[in-house]
Each structure stands twice: as structure tokens, then as C-alpha cells.
Amino acid sequence: MGSLALMLQDRATVSENSRGGDRARDISELFDREYKSLHRLAYVFVADAAVAEEIVMEAFVKVFSGWNRFRSVERKSAYLKQMVVNGCRSRLRRRGIEQRVNEAAHRDLAGHVRLESDHSDLQLDLWDAVRRLPDRQRAAVVLRYLEDLSEAEIAHVLDCSVGTVKSQLSRARRKLEVALREEAILDE
């Protein structure tokens, strides 16, 4: 009786392994067959190859994670196309929202940093230069000069030491000075 159970268990293991092999082969074949056309489809929507690839890969992950819910490969292909189109539409919607928010923030920032109308162009150029700083330096500058936080408060927000904040602010000021001199904004 024990050997019969072992034999049945071995058959079940072989059967599961062969199904797993079939699944891996089916997934590979579906990817090979559909990827290029789905990437092309996404690229037409979003006009960015990297974003198109992300969208397609997200669709494949969703199909692969729900592999057993589909009865046929055709359904998987149709679902992939639907997921890619929906992903593109979502990404475009998000891109539009981000642009509107960024434009509104830029207008608000421009309104907050203007002290006198004669200096508005200089200040806009300054904040454009700030936006070009590396992330950590930009964060330190905005927190220090726009939010008026102390170095200790900035260190807490950025989760770093006060010394790091001081060095980031110092580097940022040097970069801003160079950038503004290059644009002939500051007098030498």
C-alpha cells in the first residue's frame, strides 16, 4: 500500500511539473507573439518607448498572475490588448493632470516669490535654476528659503544630519551662483 501511494504521488508530481512546464512554455509563447505589437500599440498612444514598455509589462504581469482564469490563449491576447489600451489612457490622463498641477504650482510659486514687479524676471530665473538642482539640494533650498525652516528642521524632514543639510545648502548656493552668472543674471 505504501508503494502505491508513493507511485501516485510521483505521478502527481510529474503531472504538476509537466503542467508547470506547459504553463511556462505558453507564457513564453504568448510574450514572444504579442510583445512587439503591444509595445507598438502603446507607443502610438503615449509617444514614449520607456513608458510604453512599462505599460505592456504591467499588462503581462496581470495576465500572468491570473493565468488560470483564462480558458484560451485568444482570451489572454484580447485581455492584454485591453489592458494596454486602458493603461495608456490612464497614463495619458495622469500626465495631463500632472501637467496642470505643475503649471498651477509654477504660477503659485511665481506669485509667492515675487517681491517687486521689477524683480519678477530675476526671481523666475532663480526658481528655474533651483528646479535644475539635484533633488536633495533643491529640497534643502526650498525648505530653507521658501518654507523658512531651520537647518535642524530640514535635517528632520530630509532624514539626514544637520551637517548634510549645511553642505547641501552650500553646494546649492554655489551651483545657483554659477548658473545665474552664466545666464548673466547676476552682476559680476
Image (cartoon, helix red, strand yellow):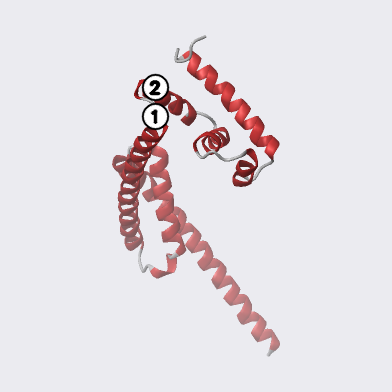
Q: Secondary structure at mark 1?
A: loop
Residue position for label 2: 119
| Residue 32 visible, this angle | no
In the image, what residue occupies the spot 53% across and 62% down? 21
- Amino acid type for the residue under numbered disc 2: His
Q: Position of residue 57 (x, y in %)?
A: 43, 50
Quadrant of res 26: bottom left
Q: Are marks 2 and 1 in contact (CB under 8 Å)?
A: yes
Question: Alpha carbon of mark 2 to alpha carbon of mark 1: how far?
Answer: 7 Å
Camera-side residue of 180 and 1: 180
Q: Position of residue 37 (x, y in %)?
A: 33, 45
- Amino acid type for the residue under numbered disc 1: Arg
Q: Is residue 74 above or below residue 130?
A: below
Quadrant of res 175: top right
Mark 2: few/some/many CA within 10 Å (<14, 14-19, 20+)? few
Of all residues, the one furthest to the bottom in this rendering is 1
| Residue 43 visible, this angle | yes
